[in-house]
Amino acid sequence: MDNKKTEQLSSFTINNEKTAPLTTNQGLKVSEDEFSLKAGLRGPTLMEDFHFREKMTHFDHERIPERVVHARGTGAHGIFQLYESMVEYTKADFLTDTSKTTPVFVRFSTVQGSRGSSDTVRDVRGFATKFYTDEGNFDLVGNNMPVFFIQDAIKFPDFVHALKPEPHTEIPQGASAHDTFWDFIGQNHESAHMVMWAMSDRAIPRSLRMMEGFGVHTFRLINADGEAYFVKFHWKPLLGVHSLVWDEAQRIAGKNPDFHRQDLYEAIEKGDYPEWELGLQIIPEKDEFNFDFDILDPTKLWPEEQVPVKIVGKMTLNRNVDNFFAETEQVAFHPGHVVPGIDFSNDPLLQGRLFSYTDTQLSRLGGPNFHQIPINQPVCPFHNNQRDGMHQMAIHQGQTSYHRNGLNANQPEPAPVELGGYESYQEKIEGRKIRGRSESFLDFYSQAKLFYNSLAPYEQKHLKDAFSFELGKCKSEMVKNNAVALLNHIDWQIAEEVAGNIGAELPEKDLEVKSDKKSPALSMANTVKQPATKCTAILLDGEPDDEKLTHWIRTLAQYNINYSIVAKKMYKISPVLKVTDTFDTADSSLYDAAILVSTSPEVEPSILEFIETTFKHFKPLGVAVEDNNALERCRVVLDAPGVYDLTKADITQFIEGIAQGRFWERTL
Ligand code: HDE
């Protein structure tokens, strides 16, 4: 189990649940904490009030700078278990010893918005994992999309400035639907592939538990004989990959901005531990140039049909944090945190990241000792001659703090490679010092087309709608026309449709890349479909039939489906059944499905919108109503796919509908 990390985290805990006197930070017991020291009961507060000053000074400094990007996030602890040894490819201990269980901490995030922004905005999701291995921390700092917007790290500040709220207005929050972002995209066609992912349903995940993760860059694995392989890392969720629909995502952003964070927290509290399998795509060094793309280019993926994903282990998130700030906010990831057997490639985006992540912590976490914060400490011992600095927590003992010392027998001493010392891969490098881009990085459109070709028709429609929405929010004609011009290199039909929707110039024909290649793994249409851990609302209008309701609830529970009983007011239906939400507090967007039970001759008007949006968002709907006309008023078609008349159909048919998730074939 992850005991080592758990023990380490609890080594400096202060538990307010224990009975203890209130003291100052110097340990002085405080006798009065509600009134400041004054000259007379109605007089001015005195400077002398050291307790007031200490309390207020600490409060004034409670916030630290949020992350420049990925500020909005949530995290959890867990474990990683290897299925089979990867000794053929790597000497990394946690990837070769199947008897080991490695503690992990994962932080999921959005990219654009600030710390308080909504969870369900259209954005890339960060998926950063810290493996606390016995050989040191390995951080897999990835995203839920397999490619990135730019090819060279030097463009990252420009890209992020364009993506973030615009500098003159600080608008918009948590959205890329604005001029500077699309201006950047129109001017930088290397973003073509990634912007297709960002406009796809992948950018509005149903749950953090239902997203894939990707290391994005090409890394290296090195085995004990010093042989190297190129590798890409994948996380595959056991619950499948599922998304929201755009209208629903926008509603949730208002109804429950903490939707994803709450979903993850509650699933873990309930024991529905989310799981992902770790997959590796491996290319032997000799095959480096055998592909029609450059494997060092971070705007390219390796199609799974060409380079299969080898499933090697499983990660389970099984413990929520005790304190959000101490753990989730202070965790510091870094793609440069590697262990023996894992090394870098020359991907110019990765190379730049290797600088940025330590640098950013200096201002965010206030100095060079952030590795001493409990969440960041490795579980194996760490010793070196680094000393002092802001917030030094350790008391280093002894006289020497320099390497090659005689006074302390040269301790701590570098470890030879045979004893686990890290050795960089001795790649042969030749070349001229040059600022430039390799020609092999210049095909911007083929994989964008591959992605589009691989999507199901409804996914393609959502993608075109997303482009039309985002560009429709832009004000500059030039920005819109340039973005359409980029789309036109990928697919004329997308460009034409989007141009028509947003009033942009109609693009010239025949500039698109010609290819009908597909990679089925890129579509979410064939993902795992199952009902467990989803959530249904049961709407009560009038007195329900207790027996039937109990039967439904028991069956839902058998399939591990969550439910809320929703009515006009909260009340106890029976000793075991309780209404937990009202028509005011609940909203259809917060559920995967709904059942309407109406025993009154006319359905309560406040439910109508709930039912209408459930249907409009393609979700399963069970109905047991007296007044079928009411359904028509909600624009629900009773014989439409995914609508179940529960006066006739069995609840298990509705549950199959929950497993299916969405009924895209419904037309309004
Ligand atoms: Fe990051 N990125 N990034 N990034 N990134 C940060 O580090 C950066 C990139 C990713 O939950 C920052 O601690 C540069 C790709 C995640 O704490 C910063 C470049 C991928 C997280 C930074 C990239 C990522 C970050 C901000 C281009 C997917 C959140 C605060 C060269 C593979 C980690 C921080 C967490 C965070 C720099 C591009 C993923 C500023 C310079 C590509 C998941 O250092």
Image (spheres, rainbow, N blue to C red):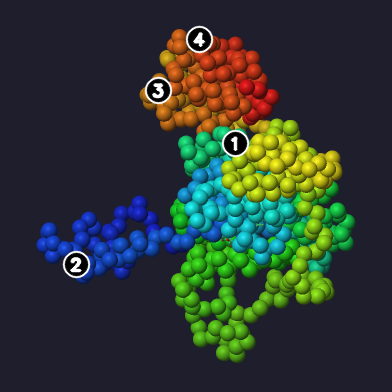
Disc 4 designates what residue? 626
Residue 236 picture location, percent across and down: 69, 45
Q: Which residue is mark 3?
A: 568
User: How far apart are labels 1 and 3 at the CA level?
Assistant: 28 Å
Q: Contact (CB < 8 A) between labels 1 and 3? A: no
Taking depth in this image into account, of 416 and 189 the one nearest to the observer is 189
For mark 1, give the secondary structure: helix
The answer to whether residue 40 of the structure is visible from this angle is yes
Q: Quadrant of residue 207?
A: top right
- For label 2, count other residues whose C-alpha is less than 10 Å away and answer few (under 14), some (14-19) or many (20+): few
Please state which of residues 422 and 253 is positioned toward the viewer in this rendering. Answer: 253
Please give the residue where the numbered disc 2 appears in the rendered image: 46
Ligand 1 - quadrant of the structure image:
bottom right
- Please tell me which of labels 1 and 3 falls first in the chain: 1
Q: What residue sits 57% from the left and 90% below the top?
A: 407
Residues under numbered marks 3 and 2 in contact, where contact means CB atoms less than 8 Å apart? no
